[in-house]
Image: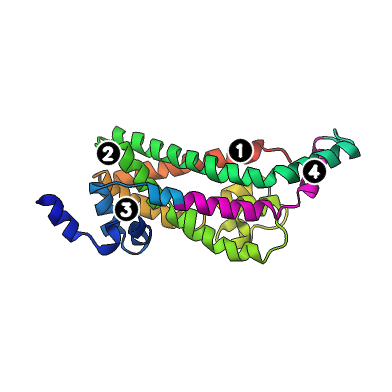
Amino acid sequence: MNDAAGKRQEGPLARSGAGRLLGVLVAPGDTFRSLAARPTWAAPLLLLVLVAVVVGWMATTRIDMAQLIRHQNEVSGGQLNAEQLDQRIAAVNKFAPYLALFQGLIVAPAVYLLCALLCWVGFKMVGSELSFKAAFATTLYGLLPLGVVEALLAIPVLWNRASLTQDEARNLSFLADNLAAAAPDGTGRVALALLASVNLFSLWAIVLLVFGYGMVARVSRAAAATVVAIVWLLGVALKVALVALAPG
């Protein structure tokens, strides 16, 4: 009886996984209320992975790998001769599309799982009875503005771009939706990574996650904001560390 009443109270977009994909953007209250009762994660995960593969492939195939490898060789002191450079460039160009597939099919889901795990642990520490399934679902739906909306806006821009630099591909600065797009020439990679972390879609996702976890984990808005902020800062720190350690 209660389940039937709960379903009648749900908006039409919250009654299916596919409907929730739009519902979380236009009616987040109904969507997260529905997730609290019946968490599902397949639809957002499939959409996030599909978009990651498409955008990753488009960006990767537009990076001038020859120029990038030659630059890295110069930075490392010219360890490769001309023949070795040509062999390296040919190998990288051959496997670059597969790298985009790996990032979309393996790396992206792993990142979402890690984010959900950190959030689940964080809310458990503040006394929530949140299940990991609910945490995973909330994380995926909360990240749709960043993982799907921003990425879909990137597709037409990439379509009209013949080439990209590695920093543009890494930070999505070609979209001009983050602070990295306004950084002056000569800004370091680490600074660019930090600036790129502040953008409209990440702020939208943070607000959505705070709102969603407050409902699904049944905690105060302050507790939800604290856990989400800590996880987001850890993510930014990891991203910056990877950029700092990357060659070139």
Return the x and y of residue 69 as percentages of the image width and height: 78, 43
Which label number is shown at residue 211? 3
The amino acid at mark 2 is Leu
Q: Are marks 2 and 1 in contact (CB under 8 Å)?
A: no
Circle 3 SS class: helix
Which secondary structure lies at badge 2? loop
Classified by dominant secondary structure, the portion drawn in magenta counts as helix
- 188 or 8: nearer the viewer: 8
Residue corresponding to mark 4? 90
Q: Nearer the viewer, mark 4 or mark 2?
A: 4
Residue 166 falls left or right of residue 83: left
Tell me the number on the disc at residue 130: 2
Q: Along the line of sight, which residue is nearer the eye, 26 or 125?
A: 26
Q: Marks 2 and 1: which is nearer the front?
A: 2
Crowding at mark 4 (Cα within 10 Å: few <14, some 14-19, many 20+): few
Mark 2 or mark 3: whose residue is earlier in sequence: 2
Is residue 54 at all visible to an observer of this figure?
yes
Q: Residue at x 54, y 63 (%)?
A: 153
Q: Amino acid at mark 4?
A: Ala
Residue at numbered disc 1: 242
Residues tagged 3 and 1 counted as in contact (Cβ below 8 A): no
